[in-house]
Image (cartoon, grey):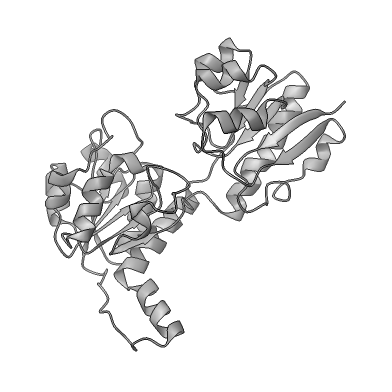
Amino acid sequence: MAVRCAVLDDFQGVATTAADWSVLGGEVAVTSFREHFGTEDELVAALEEFELVVTLRERVPFPASVFARLPKLRLLVASGMRNSVIDLAAAAGHGVTVCGTESSSTPPVELTWALLLGLARGLVAESTALRTGGPWQSTVGADLAGRRLGLLGLGKIGSRVAVVGQAFGMHVTAWSQNLTPARAAEVGVELAAAKEELLESSDFVSVHLALGDRTRGLLGAPELARMKPTAYLVNTSRAAIVDQDALLAALHEGRIAGAGVDVFDVEPLPADHPMRTAPRLLATPHLGYVSRANYATYYGQAVEAIQAYLAGKPVRVLG
């Protein structure tokens, strides 16, 4: 009898075509779930007969309680090599191997600039007006050349965002709690003396930090109040780094010019979530990692991980 494998959150229905699953032959029977399971009970009910599970990024939590309720589960493959919502100790305690995949930083860099440019040039409003017979030109674009781009975080993604900003002729400043003058100089950007200085001086602020105890709620109401009323905020990192209520208030009250957001406190967003109707907001449904090349890597290496596990030689083990 074939081993059963579940693929979670295959929203576009492409998981089984993004890679060659046929190499698994008749050993594995794959079921792709296009709907998101919003509760633990729904997740457990869907997965109770599966031995293998492939999960996408950090969308679905796997705490100890889930592992305890899935006694048949033996392998969990997560895209990326870091996952904060999987209890690795609990997985090991229940005999579940957890493996990861590689993940490119290029797609989130590109989406960051899609959001930033969309905000700066009012692309959604102008395109909508053109297609619906609205006014011909209703916005005045914000220039990039000569303006200041402030980056919160200068890691793999932040540093590549910086290079693009420099190509646009922007003055790039960066800050994080661990950022050193040497690292800033290596990328060719200015090191801000403090987070507050970066917020007060930047025309565009983009978040590229990992979520942790020190970064959770890093931008709250006091920090957003330091931004220029003409400035834009972009967050393609993690929603919890920016206080969501404070951001909504700033957008509704016009205290910043706008925000581009790809990450949310609840995903997928409920139909009545206030982010869906907030003014001055350009929002995308967590597309930062969603690209053909990344999906080929995620699912291709998920197939490799399944093959290796079945052969008794698991690869890219997390924990």
Instruction: Specify the quadrant that holds the N terminus.
Output: top right
**Image quadrant in which you'd find residue 170:** bottom left
Residue 67 image point, x, y percent: 58, 19
Residue 19 image point, x, y percent: 72, 46
Point out the residue furthest to the top here: 93
Q: What residue lies at 38% left-to-right and 61% top-to-bottom?
A: 115
**Left or right, residue 216 beside residue 198:** right
Q: Nearer the viewer, residue 97 or 49?
A: 49
Q: What residue lies at 73% left-to-right and 46% top-to-bottom?
A: 16
**Left or right, residue 318 beside residue 248:** right
Q: Nearer the viewer, residue 173 or 136?
A: 136
Above or below: residue 208 compared with residue 27: below
Q: Nearer the viewer, residue 306 or 12?
A: 12
**Image quadrant in which you'd find residue 129:** bottom left
Q: What residue lies at 87% left-to-right and 34% top-to-bottom?
A: 26
Above or below: residue 41 compared with residue 190: above
**Left or right, residue 282 beside residue 179:** right
Q: Report the label total.
A: 0
Above or below: residue 54 compared with residue 186: above
Residue 290 image point, x, y percent: 54, 52
Residue 91 image point, x, y percent: 57, 17
Above or below: residue 1 compared with residue 270: above
> Does any portion of residue 203 appear in the rendered image?
no
> Does any portion of residue 44 appear in the rendered image?
yes
